[in-house]
Amino acid sequence: MIFKIAWENVWRNKTRSFVVISAVAVGVFAGVFLLAAINSMVVQRIDSAVNEELSHIQVNNKDFRNSSDIQDIIPDFERVVSLIKSTPGVTDITGRIIIKGIASTSAKSVGVEINGIDTGKEKEMFTLSGKLITGTGSYFATETKLNSVFIGEKLAKELNIIRYILTPDAFSVLEAKKIPSFVISKLKPLSGQRFTSDKKFKRACETLLAPSESAKYGLIIRETAWSYREGSKIIISFLDINGTQTGAAFRVCGIFRTNNDLFELRSLFVPIRELRTLTGMKEGQFHRVIVRINDNRHTGEISQKIKENLPDYEVLNWKEIEPDLAMMADLMQQIYALFMAIILAALAFGIVNTMMMAVLERTKELGMLMAIGMNRKKVFSMIMLESIFLSMVGGFAGMAIAEAVIAITGKTGINLVKYSEGMEAIGYSAHLFPTIEPQFFITTALLIVLTGIFSSIYPARKALKLNPIEAIRTE
Amino acid sequence: MRVIEIKDVYKIYRETEIEVHAINGVTLDFEEAEFAAIVGPSGSGKTTLLNLLGGLDYPTSGQILIDGTDLSKLKSSALIDFRMKNIGFVFQSYNLIPVLTAKENVEFIMSLQKWSRKDRDDRTFELLKGVGLSERANSRPAKLSGGQQQRIAVARALASRPKFVLADEPTANLDSKSAATLLEIMEKLNHEEKITFIFSTHDARVVKTARRVITLEDGKVISDEKVK
């Protein structure tokens, strides 16, 4: 009966309850959706780190990461691979040669890490080959007289092998993409001009277009004008096994685009056999073993097992290689709880105010209830339940709306193109696909109930202090 | 059988510099199934006496025994429990819980006492029939007239078969027809349930219906007449 009374009391003043419920719903929606957006950044970053850049586990010679010395190869490679393969949970392994060098064109030079890879194996183990920009090559599929290299877009821009040109074809593409004709006609003066960076091109467009037109169409125009001549060449130089400076011309067989500017700038990939020939390294000599496992959640346990089997080697999982990312992933639950607690604490003041008004309005009724035999515990419970119901209706409405919006935006994505430069500089995607773990909703539900409970304490104490005789006589 | 014994009870209020003797040495007994009215001018102590009888306040001195239990010895939480089990209340106004139906209001006390569903239903329908409002069982108080609400309040007060019912000016806000109907019902239930009814009233119709009239003045009993 107390439950029924409390529930019905919530709806006695529909307008007032609606205002409070709406406030709670908006607060909860905002909190859940924001956390889903942040969570998606972390999830995407981890996905990129594991599937494009680092894999789950890496094994190196103990001195290699500090020295980057070509001589610090993995001793007894076959034994190492055999031991790792026998570890439960390991699904795939490949070896890499890793050399520090310089990539250059006539325009610029950039320090890089050259990864000599088994191209077929790495295509299976990593998703990086899928990040190939269409029209820039075929990822080692085409035979070429020169050595081949797979580089990042950032490096390609830095070496000035990417241009921005508005060709007649580009204008046709803009028309097909439904850019208004008056905007296209404004861009005609740039026809055929080559720009060596997107910043220069963007500036040139902004001098011809209105700010609103640049904001609305700028990205599509830049993407359309993006131009690369397939098969461009770069020079890569490095020290060989004997410490002699050497190098070679490489034909770019593809350009990849990820969300990590630093990775795109510093990492390039060449077929391992070509790098062996150039460096003088022998068959069976590798600097790193890359390991993939069946479940990312077991990374810690599996890497520990490998460490125990290979005490004389450096065994690192992705969390140890990128501890800040690991910290973000591990702390998401706590960050979320703290964030929601702050939002709900603010909302609690509104609930307290509403409950106080309800108690003061019902002084006579409460006096009557206490007179006929409703004890203090039941009075307290009734008011607390009312407060909890108020919080829960708003909270669950907020969660339902958040879930619906997350489901939609999780498919369509949220494009933060305005902030893409900054976000990609630190390895985060500017195209978010909000996602949230189910346990976040459980945490939210618990916090909502706690908010209801704490919000009821002051009003309930006020009610308990009522003298039934005086309360009944209240006008 | 004696249900209530009031032994030399005083109630003195000392909230300001002046002492107010609201009850000044009252000694009274009430038997089972009595139908008594307490009358007197405003300030005579009627409401204070009813509050003391109902365990809503403690006497300054003296004893109030309900079925042998001294109310002044009970702690606040025990007093609430005692009230729930032994005393029924009908107030002048605002008797009913607005968000519950008539039926739910009547069974409220029984649900607090954890009666079984069947027992609650049986007793509720018996009482609703007794007050002539069976067809309005599912109506909320807002849909009932003042007189109908007071009849439901009477049914609620009798629900858990208390030792007695205290009614503080129950007809004050009713028209004459509703008041007459209410009194008739209360008298009928008094006979059927054998439960003592004690009224505090200015209403002559209540005095006329009562079988015992106790007159208070300045906190003292100045007359106590059995009229029927």
Image (cartoon, grey):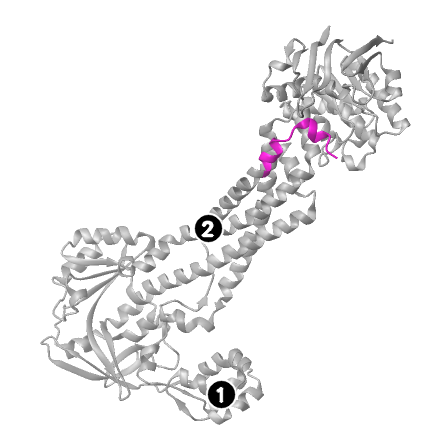
Q: Which residue is mark 2?
A: A440
- For the residues tagged 2 and 1, is the chain the same? yes
Q: Quadrant of residue A157 in the image?
A: bottom left
Q: Give A193 or A145, whichever is nearer the viewer.
A: A193
Badge 2: how crowded within 10 Å, few (<14), some, or many (20+)? some
**A182 above or below A1?**
below
**What chain is tagged by disc 1?**
A
Q: Is residue A276 left or right of residue A28?
A: left
Q: The residue under label 2 is which amino acid type?
A: Phe
At a point 54% along the width and 40% down the height, the residue shown is A453
In this view of the protein, can residue B108 be seen by the observer?
no
Quadrant housing residue A105: bottom left
User: Which residue does the image show at 53% across and 78% down from the upper left?
Assistant: A216
On the picture, is A104 further left or further right than B21? left
Highlighted magenta segment, given as a residue range: A459-475
Residue B195 position within the rendered picture, expressed as x and y whole percent measured from the top left: 76, 14
Residue B217 appears in view = yes
